[in-house]
Amino acid sequence: MKKSIKTAVVTLTAFTLLFTSPMFTPIIPEEVKAETSMTQPLRLAGTSRYDTAIQVSQSGWNYADAVVLARGDDFPDALAGVVLAKSSLVNGPLLLTETAQLSEGVLEEIQRLGATKVTILGSPGAVSEKVENTLTDQGLTVERLEGANRYGTAGEIAKAAVPQSEKVFLASGSDFPDALSISSYAAAQGIPLLLTEKKSVPEVTLETLQALGVSEVTLIGGEGVILPEVQAQLEDLDYTVDRLSGADRYGTNLEILNSLSFNTEAVYIATGAKFPDALAGAALAAQNNHPIVLAPPKAFSEEGMSYLGSRRDEGAAFTLLGGWGVISYGMESIIRTGNVNPKISLQYWDGYASYETYLRQLSLIPGKATDYVDYVSPNWRGSIGTDGSLKLVWDEGSSNYKQLTNMAHGLGMKVLPLINGSGATLNTLLKSPAAREKLIGEIVVLLKNTNADGVVIDFETPLDYGDVKDPYDGVRNDLTAFMESLHSELQSMNKLVVMAVMPRMSSSQYWLDAYDYEALSHAVDYLHVMTYDHHYRTSAPGPIAPYPWIKQVLTYIQGQGVDMSKVLMGIPYYGRDWVVDGKDANGNPTYNSTAFGYSKALELADSYGATITYSKYNDADPVGTPTFKYTDEKGVEHTVFFDDYTSWNAKLSIINEFGLAGVGPWAMGWVDENTAEGLFPLLNQHLR
């Protein structure tokens, strides 16, 4: 039973943005809503096909008296077994095992379910007697359904699952995709699924048809997989025969999806190139008659995109079956957004937020969240020790982590906790292989305990980066080694790794030598270049992220050999208000500043009657950065620089110019209801 967790719904009214530069098209954002609710899991994926089946089972069943167990390295037995899993005889999950021995974790999952009975599919050649003995030794009742071959086994399964049926589905026994496409529907409707040879129906299958009392047969797949002779053979035996088919496995899948009645509140997506993930997922989908869409390796057809688009418009929840190796990042983005060239939107979920603040920020994201945001990154790091120990902001047993993750997942987004730090502590940690290993272990525990989808690493200067004479005597190699090890560990868990790196304009900035940008880009899924803080808290007043400077930084990164399609560009959601706070040793003024968001900047300008102008960084700056000055009640002069929709729009245009992966703005803590009205539609325009 899934719990529903909801926060306040925020309705944002539409308005028109008028831009001063003719380079940029005015934006008329749509009305947007936000609602957080826990729904389907985004992705069910384990470290292997056997583990994925366990993950599916854990997602769908808190208890089951019985389970079905099939071999995981071949498909025929398990195809027919989906109907059995949904039947009253079992009403439990379908688990997979190796032939020679019971796969790791399977017995524990059976015990978690409280199951007392296991139905093994296939002969000892498919699931060995050693596996059967392992189960019986645990006091479980074990039944085996087998025939002389795959066709006979499918018949025995059908007779056990649905002893009497007027109708059957008949699919190829030589390949799996067509049977997978129909399996969840067949199971949900209690219609047996049998297998046939290409040219003729095996005698054992004909015997099963007769035993079941079948009068109607629906062939699944085109004439290339089941020849017309099969239909003629059945019709000669007085069966009514029809066919569901398409030009290929994906066409047949769509024909099934469009011809039959499914509950499309949830849609399961599995690769059409391999069978194991969809086998276990079909049993889960069958619980509520949800469809399974077969995803092609590279691109959906126009018809496939149309089907997904219709389901997306209806508000369907998409659950992907299997890890990144079977359904890639890019394919997932296409499925969730409908855009064949989507750009990534990583939103930092406030730097140091309370639980309630996280909820408020989540509520500002429009209802179709993946039209605007792919990943949210909360800062749950309390501290990092020199030994690699990681302390979190809330107690270890706090439910806050999982609740926030579930709510973000309910909107279709992934959660990537931010692990940040700087200075001598990091230097000591990175110099120690043992400490690096410990921190990786702590991150793994964090992700497992919170159900998060990956991590953002933000290790900033000052690190021990060496000096101008010997710039490589610091932690450059150690930082790269840490990221390589972390990526290897998390990749095996189907988790994402993003690294935030300092912006650099030239090789003369030797204090940034800790970042080997090219090497690091191979050790991450995305490299977030923090193109903001060009002018910072204690600098002289100036733009936070001027357009020409961003391009200069990206040009340098590109020149280091970095694949720019993995780079996220930093965007500041904040501005600064500077005042002179003293003088340095040479008598020059020193500054301090406070940060705030767009709405506060407008409020200040209005309250002091200040005129907002656009300051251009240089002649290459198309619109400049909004700025104004005012004098407060104490006679102190203030200088303010911030960003608005005009300057954000200009900077977002850089994404396509450099072929970037997307953006990583800092941070949602400065976004309020008024800012969200235009900001999220602006992101949608440039990223989707």
Image (cartoon, rainbow, N blue to C red):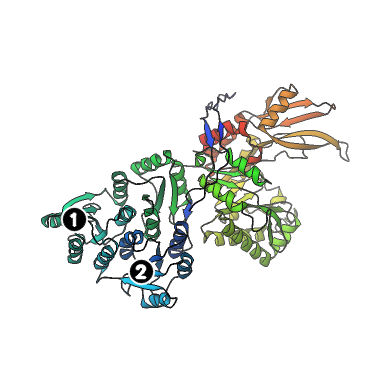
Crowd rating for badge 1 (residues with CA inside 10 Å; few <14, some 14–19, many 20+):
some
Give the residue type at disc 2.
Answer: Thr
Residue 570 in the figure: left or right of residue 463: left
- Earlier residue among tags 2 and 1: 2
Give the vertical position of 333 relative to 166 (above or below): above
Q: How many marks?
A: 2
Question: Does residue 368 appear in this view?
Answer: yes
Based on the displayed image, in which of its 4 quarters is residue 632 positioned?
Answer: top right
Marker disc for residue 167: none
Could you say where residue 93 lies in the image, as x and y percent from the top left? Answer: 40, 61
User: Could you tell me which secondary element the residue under label 2 belongs to?
Assistant: strand
Which residue corresponds to mark 1?
227
Q: Give the SS element for disc 1.
A: loop
Residue closer to the observer: 117 or 396: 117
Q: Is residue 298 left or right of residue 451?
A: left
Residue 119's disc is 2
> 641 and 381: which one is in front?
381
Q: Nearer the viewer, residue 5 or 25?
A: 5
Q: Dot 2: few (<14), some (14–19), or many (≥20) neighbours within 10 Å? A: many
Residue 365, x across and y down, in percent: 56, 39
At label 1, which amino acid type do we have? Leu
